[in-house]
Image (cartoon, grey):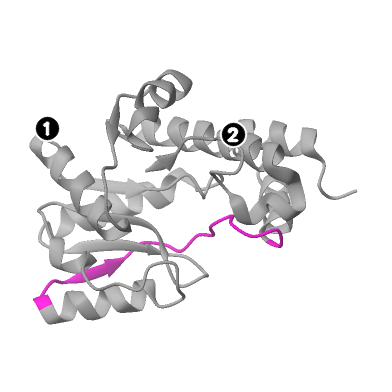
Amino acid sequence: MAKAPRPGFVKTRLIPALGGDGAAALARAFLEDSAALARDVADAYVIASPDEARGALADLIGLPALPQGEGDLGARIVSAFAALFARGHAPVLLIGADTPTLPRTHLEAAIALLAEQPGRAVFGPTGDGGYWTVGLSVPRPALFEGIAWSTPQVLADTQRAAARAGIAVALAPPWHDIDEPADLELLARQLAEDEAAAPATRAALARLRPFR
């Protein structure tokens, strides 16, 4: 699930560190690296926002594009799962474009958890209280209703929703979203630790040079 990498529309919390154009350039690199990882692991799509950006995003990263549609994040997640299940895909993992250095093994672990118990929901926790992935084998719209999105309680709220609905939950390995200026230091360390990780992000960050 990804936003079009337009200045002022995407990665707005990074604008104080990088400016509007710089934040958009880094978001584009995140998207390229995230798409390359997804394509390497499974059949992949980009679920685009805004809807009219489908063509541009498909051309940018070479994946078929579907619209995110309207509503809050929960409604758009439900819509994405429904569209992919309707195309015969199961299980389905949704990821964002905020984790460009995500290890392939994390995706493989999430897929394995779904395969072990198809009725469960799988989440990959992030340090800010959200999740880098959600995976399902069957529709579970109750998981995404009444969630306080963009808060530190997102995963906890979702786990409570799962408990109310009697849905088993398993957690994939945690990883880190890159959302805030302070996260750029973490991103630089991740890139230094793995020289093969996220080549587009590496190149974009070198051009932007936010750590002078």
Is residue 22 positioned above or below 64 on the image?
Answer: below
Three-letter amino acid code of the residue under disc 2: Ala
Left or right of 126 on screen, residue 74: left
The residue pinned by badge 2 equals 29
Question: Horizontal and vertical percent for residue 118?
Answer: 12, 56
What SS does tag 2 mark? helix
* Mark 1, other Cα within 10 Å: few <14 / some 14–19 / many ≥20: few
Q: Residue at x 68, y 58 (%)?
A: 186
Question: Horizontal and vertical percent for residue 177?
Answer: 53, 57
* Mark 2, other Cα within 10 Å: few <14 / some 14–19 / many ≥20: many
- 66 in magenta: no
- Main secondary structure along the magenta-highlighted residues: loop
Three-letter amino acid code of the residue under disc 1: Arg
Q: What stretch is highlighted in magenta?
A: 165-182
Is residue 13 positioned above or below 204 on the image?
Answer: below
What SS does tag 1 mark? loop
Is residue 66 positioned above or below 138 on the image?
Answer: above
Label annotation for residue 87: 1
Identify the mark nearer the N-term, 2 or 1: 2
Is residue 157 positioned above or below 76 on the image?
Answer: below
Front residue (pair 164, 190): 164
Label annotation for residue 39: none
Left or right of 199 on screen, residue 67: left
Looking at the rendering, which quadrant does residue 130 occupy? bottom left
Q: Residue at x 27, y 54 (%)?
A: 71
